[in-house]
Image (spheres, rainbow, N blue to C red):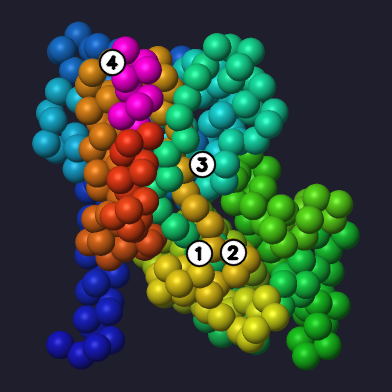
C-alpha cells in the first residue's frame, strides 16, 4: 500500500468510525423539551447540546458508551455553544452542554436565574483551523491579516488583506453567531471592538463550511481541527504567524502550544441536577475517562487528548460535583 493510499484509508476509517459512533449516540435534532427521561421500553435518555466543534468527540464517546450500555440513550445535538447554553441548558432542557470556549457571564446569569448549577469539565485541546481551497494562493496569514478577513469592516478583496495577494473577492464561510468558535475568533483575533463581519455564509454545520470552501479558489473558512482532520481532500490548512513565523495547525503544534493564538480547550458542562442521577453520573465518569484515549481522541477524532495529570484533576472535580449533587 502506498503512503497516499494509506492516508486515504486512514481518513476513510476515521469517517466510518465517527459515522457509526454518531449513529449509536442517537444524534438527532432537538424538538422541544428534551430533558433526560425514561422511555416506555425502560431505556434512559441523556440529552447533550452545544458546540459543533465538540460534537464529533462527544458523539464518539457517547456512541461507544451506548454500545456498551444498551439501556442508555445519549443524544448529541449541534446547537452551537451559545445556542446550547441560552436555548437549552440554562433553561433546564438538557443534561450537558458542550462548548468550544468557557461559559460567558450572560450565560452564567441565565443559568442562575433558572437555578441551573453545573460543573465545567475540560475534554481536549483543539487547533482552530483556517481553511482555503487546496489550489488557493493563501498559505499563511499573520494574526492582523486574519483579523482583516473577519472583522466587521472586513476587506472585500484579498489584496486589501495583503499586497502579496491578487485583486480577487473574498468568499467567506464560517460559524454562526451562536457558535463558541465564532466567539473565540472575535476574542482572540479581531477583538470585541472590531467584531465579526456579516458578509459571509454562516452555519452550524462545519461540513458545509468545508464544502463551500472547496468550491471556491477565493474562499476561506474556519472550524475545529477535527473537521479538517476528517475531511482533508480539497482543502488546505492555512498557517498562522503570531510573530515567530508561520505555524500550521496540527495535533503536534496544538499539543506543544506552538500554534497560537488559535490553540484552545474544549469543554462540557453537566448540570448538577443531572449528576444527581446515577446513570448520568456514570456516563460523565466514562466521558472523562476517555479524555486520555489517544486512539479515540487523536487518531479517530482529531483533537489532543488530556494528559494523565489533567484528567485526574477533571475526574476529581467531577467526583466532587457528583458528591455535592447527592
Q: Which residue is mark 4?
A: 277
Q: Which residue is mark 3?
A: 99
Q: Is residue 254 above or below residue 56?
A: below
**Do residues under tags 2 and 1 come within 8 Å of each other at their CB atoms?**
yes
Q: Which residue is mark 2?
A: 262
Label 2, label 3: how many angstroms apart (C-alpha)?
Answer: 15 Å
**Do residues under tags 1 and 3 come within 8 Å of each other at their CB atoms?**
no
Q: Which residues are magenta?
A: 318-326
Nearer-N-terminus badge (2/3): 3
Count every numbered label the image shows and give the total: 4
Nearer-N-terminus badge (4/3): 3
Q: Secondary structure at mark 3?
A: strand
Nearer-N-terminus badge (4/1): 1
Label 2, label 1: how many angstroms apart (C-alpha)?
Answer: 6 Å
Q: Which residue is mark 1?
A: 127
**Residue at the (72%, 62%) spot, across then down:** 189
Amino acid at each position: 500500500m502506498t503512503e497516499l493510499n494509506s492516508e486515504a484509508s486512514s481518513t476513510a476509517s476515521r469517517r466510518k468510525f465517527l459515522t457509526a459512533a454518531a449513529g449509536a449516540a442517537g444524534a438527532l435534532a432537538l424538538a422541544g423539551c428534551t430533558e433526560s427521561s425514561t422511555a416506555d421500553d425502560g431505556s434512559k435518555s441523556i440529552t447533550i447540546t452545544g458546540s459543533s466543534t465538540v460534537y464529533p468527540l462527544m458523539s464518539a464517546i457517547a456512541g461507544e458508551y451506548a454500545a456498551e450500555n444498551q439501556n442508555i440513550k445519549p443524544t448529541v445535538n449541534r446547537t452551537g455553544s451559545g445556542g446550547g447554553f441560552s436555548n437549552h441548558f440554562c433553561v433546564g432542557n438538557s443534561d450537558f452542554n458542550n462548548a468550544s470556549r468557557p461559559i460567558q457571564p450572560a450565560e452564567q446569569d441565565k443559568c442562575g436565574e433558572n437555578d441551573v448549577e453545573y460543573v465545567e469539565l475540560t475534554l481536549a485541546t483543539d487547533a482552530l483551523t483556517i481553511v482555503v481551497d487546496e489550489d488557493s494562493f493563501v498559505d499563511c496569514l499573520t494574526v492582523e491579516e486574519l483579523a482583516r478577513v473577519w472583522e466587521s469592516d472586513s476587506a472585500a478583496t484579498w489584496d486589501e488583506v495583503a499586497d502579496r495577494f491578487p485583486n480577487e473577492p473574498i468568499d467567506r464561510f464560517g460559524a454562526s453567531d451562536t457558535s463558541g468558535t465564532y466567539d473565540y475568533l472575535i476574542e482572540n483575533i479581531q477583538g470585541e471592538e472590531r467584531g465579526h463581519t456579516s458578509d459571509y455564509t454562516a452555519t452550524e454545520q462545519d461540513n458545509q463550511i468545508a464544502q463551500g470552501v472547496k468550491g471556491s479558489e477565493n474562499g476561506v473558512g474556519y472550524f475545529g481541527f477535527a473537521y479538517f482532520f476528517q475531511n482533508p481532500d480539497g482543502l488546505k490548512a492555512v498557517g498562522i504567524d503570531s510573530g515567530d513565523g508561520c505555524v500550521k495547525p496540527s495535533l503536534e503544534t496544538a499539543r506543544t502550544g506552538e500554534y497560537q493564538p488559535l490553540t484552545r480547550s474544549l469543554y462540557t458542562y453537566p448540570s448538577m441536577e443531572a449528576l444527581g442521577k446515577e446513570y448520568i453520573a456514570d456516563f460523565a465518569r466514562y466521558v472523562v475517562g476517555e479524555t486520555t484515549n489517544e486512539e479515540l481522541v487523536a487518531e479517530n477524532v482529531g483533537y489532543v487528548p488530556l494528559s494523565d495529570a489533567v484528567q485526574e484533576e477533571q475526574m476529581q472535580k467531577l467526583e466532587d460535583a457528583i458528591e455535592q449533587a447527592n
